[in-house]
Amino acid sequence: MRHFDTLENCDPSQRQANLFSRLPDVLRHAMQAPAYAEHLKGINPAAIVSRAALAQLPVLRKSDLPALHKASPPFGGFVSGATGSFGRLFTSPGPIFEPESKQADPWRGARALYAAGFRAGDVVLNTFSYHLTPGGFIFDGAARALGCAVIPAGPGNTEQQLELIEAYRPSAYSGTPDFLKILLDAAKAAKRDISSIKRAMVSGAAFPPSLQAEIASRGVEAYQAFATADLGFIAYESTARDGLIVNEDLILEIVTPGTGEPVAEGDVGEIVVTSLDPHHPWIRLALGDLTAALPGPSACGRSNMRIRGWMGRADQATKVKGMFVRPEQVAEIGKRHPELGRLRLVVSRDGENDAMVLKAEAAAQDKPGLQEAVTATLRAVSKLGGAVELVAPASLPNDGKIIADERGN
């Protein structure tokens, strides 16, 4: 079978209709939790039936979760179910506390592994950590839901891992790409046979083309997944290798960093995810990671939205003359001057002092008073003085960078 199920190649309009018909009930459930009730105060769930309506809801920033969890442990008031109603309870650096639901494949990963060639009956060496964090269980649950046997190896202990591989002869690997290369190199140096591993699903670290080529040259077809400890599998690569396909039962938006406003089609922005998990929904969780959407369906036939993968961090707040300047402040300047296009605040040094220049795309660069007006808005919004440089439309890079701190260059 080419696809995991018929959801993967359904008509995109059918998928959208299904997701947004379910969303109001998910919102109602979420708002039973006290923090969501306050966060979404005044929202009518029945009215949130489109992307445009969803974009009006406030984002919840992942970077705020540690403080929220500390103030109201364990989940910051964003979970309505009792702590004991979950199957496992984790902690990630921050700390951020994550619950795992009891159903099979709670992190929605089986279809991602299937797209990478994992099949029922495969033996999978899982080297993600099983200690307190959910990584090991995210991939373990996905593989077992697919019908695979899992070796819960965790990271490290290379010599013992080589023994396990020679004994169990796993055909697949899940873990970071870096550790896969460590295993391949260690096996070669020790003349150990780990040639049974033919495919891999990697995540948790950069997987540049050079490393992809190196691992492929060693006989392993490795595919990428974008996953987090909060949401599990968000997007995954298929054999078409034409971007990462957004997982089912998720609504993924790409917004201007520091805001909740969707970017123009194809622009780089911050990933915001809404999950339709009735037990533990996330409503517009802003992850702080950058990506861009790709046009059209994948060549493999999967019809969901595609993204370019991880493209850096959106958390670009920087301190200038002792005061923080944030992406949302730059976005506010754009709101006040809709005739501007992309904006980029460049922070540098002028002698021994911090200096900032707002580069702003403008079709009418010679419009009388525009530069002075934007300069005044920059001061009013940031409470700092800075220069404004009007530049040609489409001349600033499409990389999602709102604030460029060049003081270290």
Image: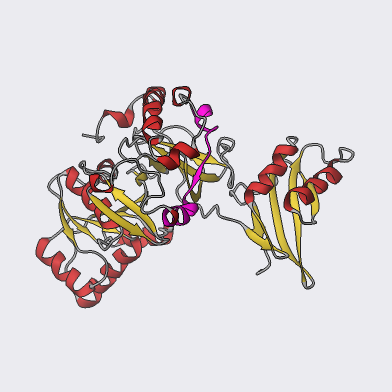
Q: Nearer the viewer, residue 15 or 26?
A: 26
Tell me which residue sits at (76%, 54%) in the image: 383
Q: Is residue 380 left or right of residue 21?
A: right
381 within the magenta span: no
Q: Please provide percent x and percent y for residue 145.
A: 18, 44
Q: Is residue 301 left or right of residue 88?
A: right
65 within the magenta span: yes
Give residue 205's quadrant in the image: bottom left
Extreme residue toward the right, this view:
368
Tell me which residue sits at (28%, 71%) in the image: 185
Q: Is residue 308 left or right of residue 137?
A: right
Q: Looking at the image, how many numbered discs can be counted on the residues?
A: 0
Q: Is residue 192 visible?
A: no
The overriding secondary structure of the stretch rendered in magenta is helix
Vertical position of residue 276 compared to residue 232: above or below: above
Q: Is residue 346 visible?
A: yes
Q: Please provide percent x and percent y for residue 267.
A: 57, 41
Residues shaded magenta: 51-70
From the image, which quarter does the C terminus lie in? bottom right
Q: Nearer the viewer, residue 172 or 269?
A: 269
Q: Please provide percent x and percent y for residue 38.
A: 48, 39
Q: Nearer the viewer, residue 366 or 215?
A: 366
Tell me which residue sits at (24%, 57%) in the image: 173
Vertical position of residue 339 compared to residue 207: above or below: above
Q: Please provide percent x and percent y for residue 331.
A: 66, 44
From the image, which quarter does the N terminus lie in? top left
Vertical position of residue 329 compared to residue 346: above or below: above
Tell me which residue sits at (36%, 39%) in the image: 281
Q: Nearer the viewer, residue 165 or 390?
A: 390
Give residue 155's quadrant in the image: bottom left
Vertical position of residue 18 compared to residue 202: above or below: above
Coloration mode:
secondary structure
